[in-house]
Image (cartoon, rainbow, N blue to C red):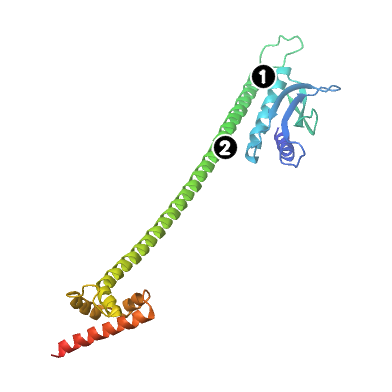
């Protein structure tokens, strides 16, 4: 039995993992009498996700099914053939083996009483069959558990990958929001600086207009003191920004006014 199992496992692996034009559909088991094509016993499907860990389970299934058929036929040596069938085909590579049925051997007249040796042999055969069945069931259960564990691990990996993608998308969205907030602050600061500049221009506008016109077109009474204070507080950058809105002549007049205001401020400080 050990040799049959080893050779059968080798045959299954050769057929399962070889390159084919058509996929392997199943293994068909037949009892083959001499001079006949045999009688179908059972078939064993090959699922698309079949892997090497399940070969041992299929070997047990085939041998247990063949042994059960041999036991039903009596104690004679029975011949079996296992066919590897591709999709759409009725014949293919084959593996032949023999098994002896395990049953009660009758005497010539069929009425010999049971002996201690016969009962012991029968009990041993029953125990062996029970052990094979238990091994087959345990192998099937282990294979199912291994397949379920593999599927669970793959599902967890997919969930983790999706989680990482969601986190990256969230980080990118937060980064874009930060850039928009910074751009809004920059734009707001520019608008505030422009507003402050226009306020200062509005304060000195009457003096500039009156100076250009040569007469008092706009009231410039108390505003002159305001202009003096403003002239002394303006920085070089602020003057450069104000000059952008004036012609060359207006720039000359503005500088003259600023110079006069600062000289006046200096004279008041000396006195």
Considering depth in this image, is 104 or 37 the residue closer to the camera? 37
Question: Is the residue marked by circle 2 packed among few (<14), some (14-19), or many (20+) residues within 10 Å?
Answer: some
243 shown above or below 62:
below
Is 166 placed left or right of 229 in the picture?
Answer: right
Please tell me which residue is depicted at 56% across the width and 35% down the height of the picture: 142
Q: Secondary structure at mark 1?
A: helix
Secondary structure beneath label 2: helix
- Give coordinates of residue 110: x percent, y percent: 73, 10
Q: Position of residue 151 (x, y in %)?
A: 55, 39
* Position of residue 145 measured from the top left corner of the image (x, y, whole percent): 54, 35
Crowdedness of circle 1 by 10 Å Cα count: few (<14), some, many (20+)? few
Q: Residue at x 23, y 81 (%)?
A: 232
| Mark nearer the viewer, 2 or 1 | 2
Quadrant in the picture for residue 66: top right
Q: Which mark is residue 97?
A: none
Q: Quadrant of the N terminus?
A: top right
**Residue 190: x, y in percent?**
35, 66
Where does the C terminus fall, quadrant-wise? bottom left
Which callout, 2 or 1, points at the residue further toward the start of the chain? 1
User: Given the current orientation, which residue lies at the most extreme right position?
Assistant: 35
The residue that disc 1 covers is: 118
Residue 147 tag number = 2
């Amino acid at each position: 039995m050990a040799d049959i199992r080893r050779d059968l496992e080798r045959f299954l692996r050769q057929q399962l993992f070889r390159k084919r034009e058509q996929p392997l559909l199943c293994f068909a088991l037949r009892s083959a009498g001499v001079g006949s094509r045999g009688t179908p016993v059972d078939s064993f499907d090959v699922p698309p996700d079949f892997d090497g860990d399940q070969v041992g389970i299929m070997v047990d299934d085939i041998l247990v099914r063949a042994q059960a058929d041999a036991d039903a036929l009596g104690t004679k040596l029975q011949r079996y053939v296992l066919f590897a069938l591709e999709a759409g085909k009725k014949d293919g590579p084959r593996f032949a083996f023999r098994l002896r049925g395990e049953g009660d051997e009758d005497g010539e007249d069929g009425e010999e009483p049971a002996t201690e040796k016969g009962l012991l042999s029968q009990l041993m055969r029953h125990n062996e069959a029970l052990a094979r069945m238990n091994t087959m069931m345990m192998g099937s259960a282990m294979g199912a558990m291994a397949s379920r564990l593999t599927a669970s691990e793959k599902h967890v990996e997919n969930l983790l990958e999706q989680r990482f993608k969601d986190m990256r998308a969230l980080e990118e969205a937060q980064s874009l929001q930060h850039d928009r907030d910074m751009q809004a602050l920059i734009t707001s600061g520019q608008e505030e600086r422009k507003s402050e500049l226009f306020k200062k221009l509005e304060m000195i506008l009457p003096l500039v207009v009156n100076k250009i016109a040569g007469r008092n077109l706009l009231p410039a009474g108390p505003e002159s003191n305001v202009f003096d204070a403003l002239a002394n507080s303006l920085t070089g950058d602020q003057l450069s920004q104000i000059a952008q809105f004036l012609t060359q002549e207006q720039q000359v007049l503005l500088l003259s006014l600023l110079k006069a205001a600062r000289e006046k401020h200096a004279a008041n400080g000396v006195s």
